[in-house]
């Protein structure tokens, strides 16, 4: 199930403070070698404070990704179209692209590159069945798997500077390759347009990334 937006926002500034401490530590050490104690020391907090917000270090990037996707990609088919959902999520991820580059180097089961596809498959399936009341056929399940495979392999490449394209172009390209049955089913949001969130403005650096 999706994590409630209110839960994601609880202690937001404290969570970002801890995330930034981890981000600084990863300039000199790999994510897998950094301990919770080192994160606490860098952030100037106690272990009790850390565990008030996160169960372990893997929960830090998981929380931020859930935050980014809760406003964007996880709303595809609910309040947003494919292009809108991708745009909002990737704009948020882009702000922390160096952080994501470093945490993505972990191969742990709970690492972000393993966690993200599990989360996305569950969310898209829930949108199909719980929101659109559509049966999850094997064909649709295959299309969800294909979509998530494309997301986890292609979206990071744009953040790494491998595609000379604006964020708007990237989101259009991603929408174009979503399997057609799944695309058509979820591209029309259920919530009226007047209630959609405001689209963020892209940063000036979105075309030239590094």
Image: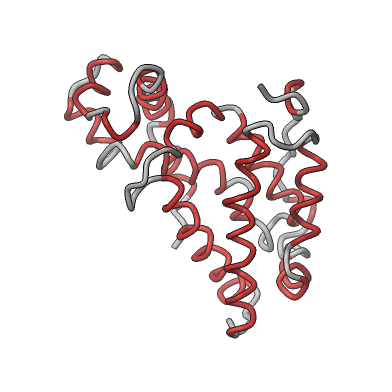
Vertically, is 23 above or below 117?
above
Q: Report x, y in % for residue 172.
A: 81, 50
Q: Residue furthest front?
A: 162
Colour convention of the picture:
secondary structure
Q: Position of residue 59 (x, y in %)?
A: 34, 42
Q: Position of residue 133 (x, y in %)?
A: 62, 79
Write the residue at 69% across / 50% down: 85
The quadrant of the rendering that contains the N terminus is bottom left
Residue 100, compared with residue 85, is above or below; it is: above
Q: How many numbered circles are shown?
A: 0
Q: Quadrant of the C terminus?
A: top right
Q: Nearer the viewer, residue 158 or 45?
A: 158
Between 81 and 141, the one nearer to me in the picture:
141
Q: Residue at left 71%, top 60%?
A: 191
Q: Nearer the viewer, residue 40 or 115?
A: 115
Tell me if 152 is positioned left or right of 204 in this view: left
Q: Position of residue 115 (x, y in %)?
A: 42, 52
Q: Quadrant of residue 197?
A: top right
Residue at (72, 65) in percent of width and height: 190
Q: Quadrant of residue 44?
A: top left
The answer to whether 71 appears left or right of 80 in the picture is left
Q: What's the residue at 61%, 73% (across, down)?
A: 128
């Amino acid at each position: 199930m999706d994590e409630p937006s209110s839960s994601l926002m609880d202690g937001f500034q404290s969570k970002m403070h801890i995330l930034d401490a981890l981000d600084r530590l990863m300039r000199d050490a790999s994510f897998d070698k950094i301990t919770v104690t080192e994160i606490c020391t860098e952030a100037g907090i106690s272990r009790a404070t850390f565990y008030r917000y996160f169960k372990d270090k893997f929960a830090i990037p998981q929380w931020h990704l859930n935050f980014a996707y809760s406003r964007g990609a996880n709303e595809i088919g609910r309040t947003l179209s494919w292009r809108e959902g991708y745009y909002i999520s990737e704009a948020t991820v882009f702000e922390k692209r160096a952080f994501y580059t470093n945490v993505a180097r972990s191969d742990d089961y709970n690492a972000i590159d393993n966690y993200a596809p599990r989360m996305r498959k569950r969310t898209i399936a829930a949108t199909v069945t719980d929101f659109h009341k559509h049966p999850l056929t094997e064909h649709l399940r295959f299309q969800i798997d294909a979509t998530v495979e494309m997301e986890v392999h292609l979206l990071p490449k744009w953040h790494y500077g491998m595609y000379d394209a604006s964020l708007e172009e990237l989101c259009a390209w991603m929408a174009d390759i979503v399997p057609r049955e799944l695309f058509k089913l979820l591209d029309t949001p259920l919530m009226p347009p007047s209630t959609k969130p405001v689209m963020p403005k892209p940063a000036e650096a979105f075309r030239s990334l590094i």
